[in-house]
Amino acid sequence: MILRALATIVLLALLALAFALPSTSIGRRGSEPGARRDVEGMLDPGRALPSFELVGLDGRPVSGDELRGAPLLLVLERSIDWCPFTKMRLLQLREAFADTPDLRIVWVMSEAQISPRTRIFIDELGLGARILFLADPKSRLIRKLGLLKPDPEPIEKGVPHPTTLLLDREGRVRFIDVREDYHIWLDPSTIARALQALESEPTAVGSPD
Amino acid sequence: MLRLRIYRVLLGTLGIASSVFGLALVMAFFAYQRPGSEPRIPTGPVGHYFVAFTGCALIGWAGGLIGAARDPFASRTVATTTAFVFALMAGVRMVAWGVGDYASWLGDLPRTEAILLLGLSIALVWLRPTVSECERASMTSRPHGSQSGSEAS
């Protein structure tokens, strides 16, 4: 009888946890429509990004100049090895812009966050067909833009604050979203609206909502 | 006794469901081996190997559940083990719910499954026969004169 009561207590505790999951910090996740600017870095609407060089997952160097010529969605994110929120965001973004071939999507991670699991995630879900994944050696670009996460956990080596930039064909920043809280990310519909504005008024300079 | 009847129905239903699911997994493995086949389960050859392994284990587990449904006093360990495994499966689902790879594919389903499995687990813990019921049943089923030892507590 005591064992039965103990088992019931443990099971009820687990059941309570299952019900409470959405209100825990793990459960707090999802997208929100408004753009944020939690961290003031080197980013300003209308300015071009400083020159930079990144590296493809195949080791090929890619310069910032090579990425010009089409609207560019430049996303600097944490890790698709261990961060569930980043993975969810990436998949949501791919789905949202599957039918927008004119928009080039570049996903940048710190070189320290590229692992075999990262490559498996990209390959198994065929993400490379739509998104260009680039590594930032020693987080140089992340540091240059003032986006490096301060006081990182050991696993977070070199990660930026999640950042979304929309650049026009000339490489000028037209839309910025930088956030400290990685649980809640920018809704793709906001990016789609910014892209629409960029295509309808190619010379106007946008700013966060 | 209503409690026992519900227990037997529950074990029988779980046994049949496990055997059908197990069989489907084993069939998925064989179907995958056909040339040019499209995988029914989104995984590769190594994944299908483990899918078949899981299917075989489920069929074996189903046998135990159906046996316990037919003779609930023969072994209450089947219900205890099933309750434990359901709790374990619920734990796995709660972790999967928090991981983007699964959450983006399954949404809130893992958490709903976890709640259902924990409910079943509690039901099994409370519906299974008590030790004294099992001992009484074993004494009455033994041939006359061979009864020994312990009185039901």
Image (cartoon, helix red, strand yellow):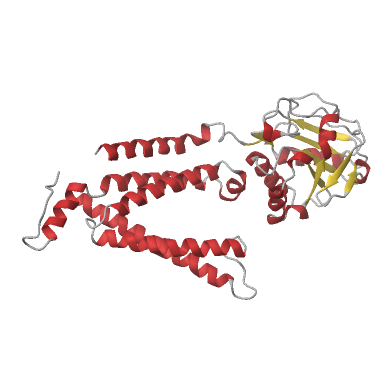
Judge by depth and name the residue closer to the eye, B16 or B82.
B82
Judge by depth and name the residue closer to the eye, A99 or A44.
A44
Residue B35's place in the image compared with A108, above or below, is: below
Judge by depth and name the residue closer to the eye, A192 or A112.
A112
Q: Is residue A29 left or right of residue A55?
A: left
User: Quick one: quadrant of the C terminus of chain B?
Assistant: top left
Residue A61 seen in the current view: yes
Q: Residue at x 72, y 51 (%)?
A: A119
Q: Is residue B18 left or right of residue B109?
A: left
Residue lying farthest front? Answer: B149
Q: Is residue B134 left or right of residue A115?
A: left
Residue A138 coordinates in the image, percent (x, y): 82, 36
Q: Residue at x 31, y 62 (%)?
A: B66
Q: Is residue B101 left or right of residue A105?
A: left
Judge by depth and name the residue closer to the eye, B109 or B90.
B90
Residue lying farthest left? Answer: B145
Residue B69 coordinates in the image, percent (x, y): 27, 59
Q: Residue at x 17, y 50 (%)?
A: B133
Residue A199's place in the image compared with B136, above or below, is: above
Residue B1 seen in the current view: no
Residue B76 coordinates in the image, percent (x, y): 27, 52
Q: Quadrant of residue B119?
A: top left
Q: Quadrant of residue A205?
A: top right
Count of labels in the image:
0
Q: Quadrant of residue A76?
A: top right
Q: Residue at x 56, y 41 (%)?
A: B98
